[in-house]
Image: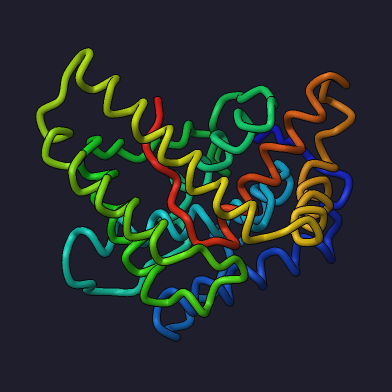
């Protein structure tokens, strides 16, 4: 397959990338170890060679497990191969967010990777409610503390939007999406205030490191926007905030 090979995709770096993903997958599988070897290793190595940031790959694994849990009781451990569509989907979203072009999706054998079925608007809102409710219950585990009042108000607004979202079409659906976008902005503003200047500066540096393999291919005038988008994603992660539905 063609690869978007980054400057740091050497053998040692790729091996460590695979080890970190294997450890993370083990934790997600409640300690059940599934080795990333053979074709699975080639698959994950291809992510590293294409420049998929480690945190983006882990977010894709998280998204796959969210879908898996939503289907009911788990029956068997999840292999990394099943996570690939979500990993590549989030990689596409990340590249769009930071202003990078999105090319054809590929698997290690050269066949196009299928996109995961998109959840309905109502289902996405339900997931956001679950995520924020869990966020309130485990506030002490997050680096960025958001006041309970902000989180409670956000959950309340999402619950009010949920019923309408089940059957919303046309203008009504666009109105709901606009309200979700405004709510997302308020939550991120609260997270920025809570994080403070020192943490935001550190997150900006982390974002620059994520973008480093792509900077030479990025128009100079896109760099500030790309850096801000990367910072926002990292802030959302530190604050434990869901990505609210947008179109």
Of residues 31 and 242, the one drawn nearer to the viewer in this rendering: 242
Q: Is residue 37 visible?
A: no
Q: Is residue 207 visible?
A: yes
- Asked if residue 205 is positioned above or below residue 1 in the image, the reply reads below
Q: Nearer the viewer, residue 132 or 192?
A: 192
Query: Where on the picture, by quarter, is residue 11?
Result: bottom right
Image coordinates of residue 154 in percent, x first then y, are 34, 51
Q: How many marks?
A: 0
Q: Residue at x 26, y 64 (%)?
A: 69
Q: Left or right? Give the position of 71 relative to 14.
A: left
Relative height, residue 126 to residue 151 (above, below): above
| Residue 71 placement: quadrant | bottom left
Is 119 on the left-hand or right-hand side of 210? left
Image quadrant in which the C terminus is located: top left
Q: Return the residue nearer the eye: 120 or 101.
A: 120
On the picture, is 230 further left or further right than 66?
Answer: right
Determine whether, in the image, residue 61 is placed left or right of residue 218.
left
The residue located at (61%, 56%) in the rendering is: 44
Q: Residue at x 83, y 41 (%)?
A: 213
Q: Is residue 243 depicted above or below 69 in this figure?
A: above
How far across and down, in percent of the image, does residue 134 sit?
35, 69
């Amino acid at each position: 397959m063609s690869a978007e090979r980054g400057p740091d995709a050497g053998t040692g770096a790729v091996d460590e990338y695979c080890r970190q993903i294997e450890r993370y997958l083990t934790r997600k599988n409640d300690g059940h170890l599934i080795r990333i070897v053979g074709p699975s290793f080639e698959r994950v190595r291809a992510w590293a060679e294409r420049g998929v940031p480690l945190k983006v790959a882990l977010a894709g694994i998280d998204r796959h497990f969210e879908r898996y849990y939503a289907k009911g009781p788990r029956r068997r451990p999840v292999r990394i191969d099943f996570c690939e569509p979500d990993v590549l989907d989030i990689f596409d979203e990340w590249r769009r967010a930071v202003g990078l072009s999105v090319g054809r999706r590929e698997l290690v054998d050269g066949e196009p990777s299928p996109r995961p079925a998109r959840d309905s608007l109502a289902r996405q809102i339900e997931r956001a409610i679950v995520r924020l409710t869990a966020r309130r219950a485990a506030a002490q585990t997050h680096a960025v503390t958001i006041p309970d009042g902000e989180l409670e108000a956000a959950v309340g607004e999402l619950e009010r939007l949920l019923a309408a979202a089940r059957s919303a079409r046309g203008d009504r659906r666009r109105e709901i999406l606009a309200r979700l976008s405004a709510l997302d902005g308020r939550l991120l503003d609260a997270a920025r205030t809570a994080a403070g200047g020192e943490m935001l500066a550190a997150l900006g540096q982390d974002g620059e490191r994520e973008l480093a393999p792509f900077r030479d291919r990025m128009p100079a005038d896109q760099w500030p926007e790309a850096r801000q988008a990367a910072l926002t994603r990292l802030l959302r992660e530190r604050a434990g905030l869901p990505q609210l539905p947008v179109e």
